Amino acid sequence: NGLSHGETNVPLERLVIERALSVNTAAAGGNASLMTIG
């Protein structure tokens, strides 16, 4: 995955953020304002 030693928390954090954003976007029905924030 191209992970360097000591950077393991970065992809994990991004994965959590992207999952949260996708869930929020789905819950908002694809709100345009939410998309611009993300």
Image: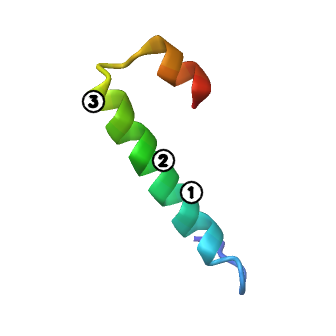
Category of crowding for the residue at label 3, using alpha-carbon neighbours closer than 10 angstroms: few (below 14), some (14–19), many (at least 20):
few
Above/below status of 37 relative to 33: below
* Label at residue 18: 2
Which residue is found at the position 70% from the left and 77% from the top?
7
Residue corresponding to mark 1: 14
Classify mark 3: helix, strand or loop.
Answer: helix
* Label at residue 27: 3
Quadrant of the snapshot with the N terminus: bottom right
Q: Splitting the image into 4 quarters, where does residue 13 fall? A: bottom right
8 relative to 32 in the view: left or right: right
30 relative to 4 in the view: left or right: left
Do the numbered discs 1 and 2 sit on residues whose CB atoms are within 8 Å? yes
Q: How far apart in space, not on screen, are marks 2 and 3 (Cα)?
A: 14 Å
Which residue is found at the position 71% from the left and 86% from the top?
5
Classify mark 1: helix, strand or loop.
Answer: helix
Figure colour scheme? rainbow
Query: Percent position (x, y) of residue 10?
Result: 64, 67
Quadrant of the snapshot with the C terminus: top right
Which residue is found at the position 53% from the left and 68% from the top?
12
Q: How far apart in space, not on screen, are marks 1 and 3 (Cα)?
A: 20 Å
Do the numbered discs 2 and 3 sit on residues whose CB atoms are within 8 Å? no
Amino acid residing under circle 3: Ala
Q: How far apart in space, not on screen, are marks 1 and 2 (Cα)?
A: 6 Å
Classify mark 2: helix, strand or loop.
Answer: helix
Amino acid residing under circle 1: Arg
